[in-house]
Image: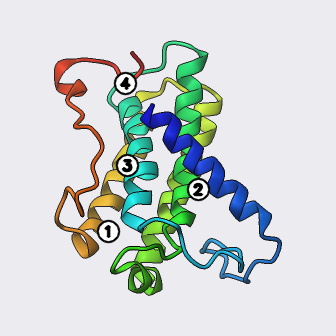
């Protein structure tokens, strides 16, 4: 159910972003944000937990050797890749959070956000070709961990943050697949 809510949120956001026809010119290494979108209807923290954090679990699972079993599972990994691509752009738009407006102005915030998008872009072809190369997925997951930890060290060292959580994941320790 939470996955469906995340997909619905991402789809709604993508439609809203797509409806805006004008975009600001941005340097090649940044995401162009449509001019009509000025704030998110939720905090950046909520967007990160609901979109990025949830999707990261699928990418990390692949690097841990927890591989999809069927076409539906591969669709989950592909959707997680798209979520990461979208998420990097979304968190560059201030939301309702107390510090959102200042975060999105910081150069390092934009750098880490753009790296999230790049990680998603690098995961997408792996998902589309249904790669079972655990080492390649692990390297991608390690990039994601490094990126998340660097950003959290600078902006949100307290985890869980602002009381927004998703269920605790103990499946790795218990040997339970994310795809079950």
* Quadrant of the image containing the N terminus: top left
Q: Residue at x 53, y 74 (%)?
A: 93
Nearest-to-viewer mark from 1 and 3: 3
Instruction: Identify residue for label 2.
Output: 86
Q: Position of residue 55 (x, y in %)?
A: 44, 42
What separation in Å lies between label 2 and label 3 (alpha carbons)? 13 Å
Q: Is residue 138 left or right of residue 162?
A: right
Q: Residue at left 73%, top 83%?
A: 25
Q: CA distance from mark 2 to mark 1?
A: 17 Å
Closer to the camera in the image, 92 or 19: 19
Badge 2 element: helix
Q: Earlier in the sequence, mark 4 or mark 2?
A: 2
- Residue that numbered label 4 is attached to: 178
> Residue 114: where, in percent of width, then height?
52, 67
How far apart in space, not on screen, are marks 1 and 3 (Cα)? 13 Å
Label 2 Cα neighbours within 10 Å, binned few <14 / some 14-19 / many ≥20: many
């Amino acid at each position: 159910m939470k996955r469906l809510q995340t997909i619905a949120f991402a789809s709604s956001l993508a439609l809203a972003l797509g409806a805006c026809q004008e975009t600001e010119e941005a340097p090649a290494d940044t995401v162009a944000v449509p001019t009509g979108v000025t704030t998110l209807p939720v905090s950046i923290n909520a967007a990160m937990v609901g979109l990025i954090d949830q999707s990261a679990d699928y990418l990390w699972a692949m690097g841990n050797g927890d591989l999809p079993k069927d076409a539906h599972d591969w669709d989950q990994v592909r959707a997680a890749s798209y979520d990461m691509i979208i998420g990097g752009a979304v968190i560059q738009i201030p939301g309702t959070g107390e510090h959102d407006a200042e975060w999105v102005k910081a150069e390092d915030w934009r750098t880490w956000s753009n790296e999230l998008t790049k990680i998603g872009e690098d995961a997408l072809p792996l998902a589309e070709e249904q790669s079972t190369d655990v080492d390649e997925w692990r390297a991608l997951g390690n990039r994601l961990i490094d990126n998340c930890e660097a950003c959290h060290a600078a902006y949100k060292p307290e985890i869980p943050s602002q009381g927004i959580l998703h269920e605790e994941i103990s499946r790795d320790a218990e040997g339970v697949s994310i795809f079950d």
